[in-house]
Image (cartoon, rainbow, N blue to C red):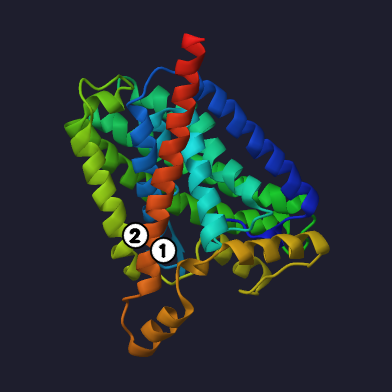
Amino acid sequence: MHMSDALLSPVVGGAFWIAGGSLIAISAKKIATENDQLKTPLMGVMGAFIFAAQMINFSIPGTGSSGHLGGGLLLAVLLGPYRAFITMASILIIQCLFFADGGLLALGCNIFNLAFYSAFIAYPIIFSKIAGDRQNPFKLGVASLSAAGAGLLMGAFSVVIQTLLSGITELPFTTFVLFMLPIHLAIGIVEGLVTWGVLAFVQKTEPALLLSAKPAAFPRLTIAVFTLTALLTGGIISWFASADPDGLEWSMAKTTGDEAFTGKKDTVKEFFEGLQEKTAFLPDYSFKSATEASSATGSPVNTGTSVSGIVGSLSVLAVAGLTGAVLGRKRRSGETA
């Protein structure tokens, strides 16, 4: 559900840049007041895991569409809403700048749609209320499915509103929303199941993380498992991702009849596109030569995809982890001042 610049006007894109930046600043301030340094390495590791997981598009049977894990709810449950928001923002910034995944003008919208609703609405209002003390496996499952589905639906509806406000008449509101919501509900169900599975693993290996308590010891096993899984997923499993269009692309194609919707060009969009072309050294998570070779041989192996998965995962691990460390240091400096 990464929006492209074609779906937005500069005014709407700029407004959500401000909204996203403001939420990052608020979250950073909140994290700086917390006293939980064990969550700092987990920010990096879980960010890397979600980055890699988002590279795996899974087919939605009977639709010709695909979806991928959003991950905002899972981050919120394990890190808290503010650390989750910062971590998801780190993922989206790296995806946008290094891999041209999502438009640069649309970055604020993507942060808002994928991070805000899951971290600040679905998690505290839906997941926490249903999951209760988080010890009942059935309640944990219901909470994961309900909150993940709601977060995806809110994000999808937000995309429709943003295109409406941008005056993208090729995507009429009623038609667009009738395609967007059902397909993202299906994606949300899968995300809920994956979230439930991951939380069940954490419940067995490091239950204190699930209970928002401080672990008695550094969670080495959990961190090692998620780090290894991120590298394997990004480096190898990503070869087998579905080639079907994702839920947003599919909805756009169904609404407009054009799979290559590019929207109207203007000076601002061209500026952002040109800037993104300069920063994205692995556009679409691949080297061009590797893509051509893999298509010619029929082999799923793609060196560019592997490099993208590993480099991206490590980049998110470093950026999110470093951000948490810097904010923690600011708190300690304030205490000693």
Q: CA distance from mark 1 to mark 2?
A: 7 Å
Q: From where the camera sits, is residue 178 visible?
A: yes
The reply to whether discs 1 and 2 touch (Cβ–Cβ < 8 Å) is yes
Q: Position of residue 282 (x, y in %)?
A: 49, 67
Where, quadrant-wise, is the N terminus in this rendering?
A: bottom right
Residues 277 and 70: in front is 277
In the displayed structure, 172 sits above or below 113; it is: below
Residue shown at 50% from the left, 57% from the top: 183
Q: Secondary structure at mark 1?
A: helix
Q: Which residue is denoted by mark 1 in the rendering?
A: 308
Residue that sits furthest to the front in the current view: 337
Q: Quadrant of residue 167?
A: bottom right
- Kindly identify which residue carries mark 2: 234
Q: Position of residue 298 (x, y in %)?
A: 33, 85
Q: Nearer the viewer, residue 106 or 67?
A: 106
Image point 27% across, 58% down: which residue?
Answer: 232
- SS class, disc 2: helix
Q: Position of residue 73 (x, y in %)?
A: 43, 38
Residue type indicated by callout 2: Gly
